[in-house]
Image (tube, helix red, strand yellow):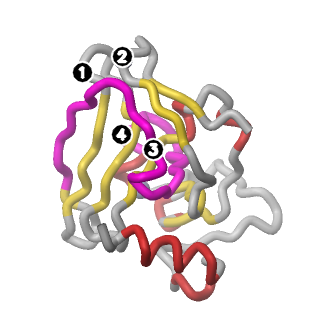
Amino acid sequence: MNMEGGCSCRAIRYKLTDSPLIVHACHCRDCQRITGSAFVINLWIERSAVEVSGKPKSFMLKGGSGANHEVFFCPSCGVYVWSVYHGAPGDCLFVRAGTLDRPESVTPDAHIFTRSKLPWLELPAGARAFKEFYKFDDVWSPQNRERLRKSAKH
Ligand SMILES: [Zn+2]
Ligand SMILES: [Zn+2]
C-alpha cells in the first residue's frame, strides 16, 4: 500500500510509516467548510508515524468541544494536509485522505458528526455512523487503543 501524499505544489510531502489507527469521515460543519465539500476523510495516526518534508503553516479553530483544532496547510498552494486536535488523546495527526497519492487505499471506519451530514448524501449500507462521536471501547481494537496510549508518552 502506497501511503504517501502531499499538497498540490509538492512543497509538502509526507509518508505514513504505519497503518492509520482509524479512518474517520467527519461530517461536522468545520470539516465541511475547510474542505469546501460534504465531509473530510481523516487518517488518525501517531505523529511519529508521519515523515514530513516541507513546513506546513497552521491556524487555530475552536473545536466543538471547546478544545483547539489546529489546521495545517501548505504555505505555497494552501492545501490542507492535516489537523491536530488538541483535545484528542495521544500525540497524533489527522491526515487528510484526499491528499494521499492513492486516496482509494483507505475506507472510512466510522462516519462521525452525521447530525450535520448533507441530506442528499446516503452512507453505504452497514457503515458505522455516529451523530456526534463514539466511545473508544465500542469502535477501536484493543491493539489500536494501546498504540494511542503509547503515542501520548513521548
Ligand atoms: Zn503546496
Ligand atoms: Zn469535523
Q: Which residue is mark 3?
A: 50
Query: Where's residue 58, x and y in %?
Result: 21, 38
Of marks 2 and 3, which one's residue comes earlier in the chain? Answer: 2
Instruction: Identify the residue position indicated by label 1 in the image.
Output: 75
Graded by Cα atoms within 10 Å as few (under 14), some (14 to 19) or many (20 or more), the crowding at tag 4 reads: few
Q: Tag 1's secondary structure?
A: loop
Q: Using the rendered view, name the quadrant where residue 73 is placed.
A: top left
Residue contact at pointers 3 and 1, CB within 8 angstroms: no
* Label 4 vs 3, first from the N-terminus: 4
Q: Are marks 4 and 3 in contact (CB under 8 Å)?
A: no
Residue interval drawn in magenta: 32-61
Residues packed near mark 3 inside 10 Å, few (<14), some (14 to 19) or many (20 plus): some
Query: Which is nearer the eye, 123 or 147?
Result: 147
Residue tagged 4 = 34
Dot 4 beta carbon under 8 Å from ligand 2: no
Estimate the spatial distance between the alpha carbons at disc 1 and disc 2, rounded to whole Å. 8 Å
